[in-house]
Image (cartoon, helix red, strand yellow):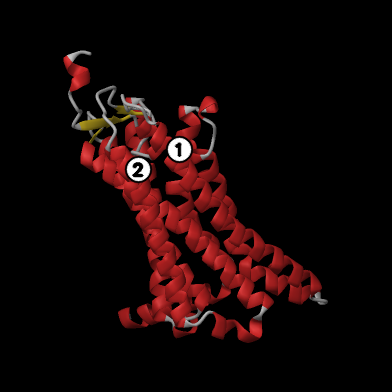
Amino acid sequence: MTMKNQTTIRFFLLSGVSSDPQMQPFLFFLFLLIYLVTVMGNGTIMVVIKADAHLHTPMYFFLFHLSCLDICFSSVTVPKMLQNFLAERKTISFPGCIAQMSIILLVGCAEVFVLSVMAFDRYAAICDPLRYFGTMNNQVRIRLVGGAWLISIVFALINTAPVLNLHFCGPTEVNNFSCEFPSLLQLSCTETFISKMTFLTTTMLASLTSFSITLVSYICIISTILKIRSAGGRGKAFSTCSSHLTVVVLYYGAALFRYLRPSSSSSVALDRLFSIQCSILTPMLNPIIYSLRNKEIKAALGIILGKIKNLCM
């Protein structure tokens, strides 16, 4: 073994979205715009929910936390990506890379379980409306969101611990714009079987648990909606969960393809594409989907903008 292979590296090179130097300025402004839309869109939803007393309900409580997670998810990767678009050497320190990987795992897992909690909330609202506010009282809501965060912290710690025992001695280039778990594992010069099995087991367990909650909730919801006799009643009931269902499909689709695709069919281009959709595009689209399809949020936003306009006049 050479001296190079005996030395632990101190930084990684991120390959980024594109290696074409002429594309870097365009990509910088494109992803800067996406990031600003993400932060402003999700931040606006959070402000509107906090400011309007009519939105202090279980559904909007969970939407508030989903918007917070979307800002966190995008902020983990995009600022470093923007910095690297303007840098000659697209580097990230070893501790920074491990920290980024851990936070991606934590926030990604938390978002999955918050989406499951939101599906259960829609089940309680549609299938048992008379006891809805009793079922989803303030204490229950806090416990559900706290449970989602606790599970996610454990998930991130369990998968980070084996990586800390790996030895990285070169190559140093991560074939992605961020330090995601699969991309980082490919650079280890020691056996990664334990890390891969731990990640596969915990990811399958978390995915099946959260997906089962979501699936059973929507089976019950659809069954209840189909029993409603009037077309208007069915449309109104379905409209309350259509935004959530759209977000679930977008997020689950990208996450499953990115993390559970067999390594034999691995493609760097596809990995980057699904990573962008999961951690950058979906957080941007979530507030757009919820605001465009939600009359209460649009009405509350209109009232707030009206008050701001009156103050400025």
Which residue does the image show at 62% across and 77% down from the upper left?
125
Looking at the image, is 135 positioned above or below residue 193?
A: below
Q: In this view of the protein, can residue 117 be seen by the observer?
A: yes
Residue toward you, 150 or 220: 150
Looking at the image, is 70 positioned above or below residue 184?
A: below
- Which part of the image, by quadrant, shows the N terminus? top left
Which residue does the image show at 33% across and 27% down from the upper left?
187
Q: How many marks on residues?
A: 2
Residue 132: x %, y % from top left: 59, 82
Q: Residues within 10 Å of mark 1 (few under 14, many from 20)?
A: few
In the image, taking residue 145 as reference, residue 261 lies left or right, namely right
In the image, taking residue 76 as reference, residue 95 lies left or right, namely left
The residue singled out by tag 2 in the image is 29
Q: Residues within 10 Å of mark 2 (few under 14, many from 20)?
A: few
Which residue does the image show at 33% across and 33% down from the upper left?
24
Which residue does the image show at 42% across and 75% down from the upper left?
142
Instruction: Determine the image quadrant of residue 97.
Output: top left
Q: Amino acid at mark 1?
A: Met
- Which part of the image, by quadrant, shows the C terminus? bottom left
* Label at residue 240: none
Q: In this view of the protein, can residue 251 be seen by the observer?
A: no
The residue singled out by tag 1 in the image is 197
Residue toward you, 241 or 192: 192
